[in-house]
Amino acid sequence: MGFQDKSLQCADCGTNFTFTAREQEFYAVKGFTNEPKRCQSCRQSRKRQGNNSGQRQMFAATCAQCGKETEVPFEPREGRPVYCSDCFNKVKTTRS
């Protein structure tokens, strides 16, 4: 399949950018069906905003083993035990 460079318009800043034949081939190999909507600088900017500068949302929880208050990087669900890092490491090593 022969690819040719395409000129696309960035959805964020409105500038035209080139979707190269090489990038199109990469998209095809990966199975991507949509063309990029943003230029390279807008993609990088959006990526930086998306990771919140390394900050993760943490949720308060009580350890099911020792009862200590802790924070975990996921929202605890009813009926599922949550462990502090010390108890988690103990539980993890007993399962291995």
Image: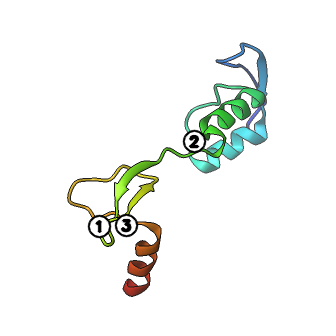
Rendered position, 77 above or below 46: below
In what element is the residue under mark 2? loop
Q: Which residue is mark 3?
A: 83
Marks 2/1: CA–CA distance: 43 Å
48 with respect to 67 (left or right)? right
**Closer to the camera in the image, 41 or 57:** 57
User: Measuring 72% from the left and 15% from the top, which residue is drawn there?
Assistant: 13
Residue 80, picture quadrant? bottom left
Give coordinates of residue 94: x percent, y percent. Answer: 38, 86
Three-letter amino acid code at disc 1?
Answer: Ala
User: Measuring 41% from the left and 52% from the top, which residue is drawn there?
Assistant: 74
Q: Disc 3 or disc 2, which is closer to the eye? A: 3
Marks 1/3: CA–CA distance: 6 Å
Q: Which residue is mark 2?
A: 32
Residue 71, picture quadrant? bottom left
Alpha-carbon neighbours of circle 1 within 10 Å: few (<14), some, or many (≥20)? some
Q: Are marks 1 and 3 in contact (CB under 8 Å)?
A: yes
In what element is the residue under mark 1? loop
Q: Mark 2 or mark 1, which has the lower sequence index? A: 2
Rendered position, 91 above or below 2: below
Three-letter amino acid code at disc 2?
Answer: Phe
Q: Residue furthest left?
A: 79
Rendered position, 64 above or below 19: below
